[in-house]
Amino acid sequence: MDISDARRQVAEINALQVQPKYANAIEITTPALFDRLEKAIAANGGGGGDDRTLPVRKCLSLEISCRELDIDELSGWILAVDLPSDYPSRSTCRVRAVRDGETVGDAGAKIAAYLQSFLGCECLELILDWLYDNKSACLSSGGSDASDDAAGGVECYVLRYNHLLLGPEHKKEKAMVDAAKKSKLQGGLLWGTPGIIVVVPPSTEEDAREYATASKDIGKRPDGVEAARMPESGLV
């Protein structure tokens, strides 16, 4: 396991646990491994030597209680989440919806389809946002698979950047936000490394490509413009 991935995993979990709305909902089910990673990160210092690897045989796992998230429709449901050893740099989370010890519905497959466009990004809060927006869909019997669900979604356009950082000192990012507002671009922005911009309807592929060109002129070059289908309910 790359220590850079370990650092990001631990930081992501800690950031969620200090938020009051999530603090009681998240339980780390591999606490010994979590403690070991925290100690390894501390021993590695302030970030130098992130090319090191750690001998890890299993992945970090956690459970998210829908009852503690006050999602009454899914009371009794638990999301069992695994963070692969190469997450988030080269994979996304693995998710199962569980009730009374049994896998229920197809929420895990739907979440997996949703996360495909966010490879390289921290995903836990994305999962929670999706769950709030799609709690009714989770109650379906699960007759369709994830690919059918994605195919029935809305076509959006994803622009990936090496990084997009929030703060007044980051003038290029501010210029990008101003450019999006000026062109009335519809979509969302995920700050971090990497940085992600998702362009949604009524903005079009042409709008997304024009914005990619504007980004290059500002000095922020996206990897390209990638078409992706996403659930419509999560975009409103």
Image (cartoon, helix red, strand yellow):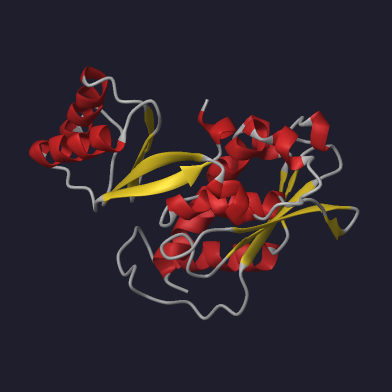
Residue 198 occupies quadrant: top left
Q: In the drawing, does residue 89 fall left or right of residue 230?
A: left
The answer to whether residue 18 is seen in the rendering is no
Q: Residue at x 73, y 39 (%)?
A: 24
Vertical position of residue 9 compared to residue 107: above or below:
below
Q: Nearer the viewer, residue 40 or 220?
A: 220
Q: Position of residue 136 (x, y in %)?
A: 74, 33
Q: Position of residue 135 (x, y in %)?
A: 72, 35
Q: Which residue ends up furthest to the right in the rendered image?
A: 100
Q: Residue furthest left?
A: 217
Tell which of 71 and 52 is nearer to you: 71
Of 114 and 177, which appears nearest the observer?
Answer: 114
The structure residue drawn at horizontal position 19% and vertical position 25%, both measured from the top left corner, is 179
Return the x and y of residue 79 as percentages of the image width and height.
73, 50
* Residue 136 appears anywhere in the view: yes
Q: Position of residue 123 (x, y in %)?
A: 52, 49
Position of residue 151 in the picture relative to residue 168 (left or right): right
Image point 25% across, 32% down: which residue? 207
Give the number of callouts: 0
Q: Is residue 54 above or below residue 20?
A: below
Please name the residue shown 28% across and 30% down the image. 167
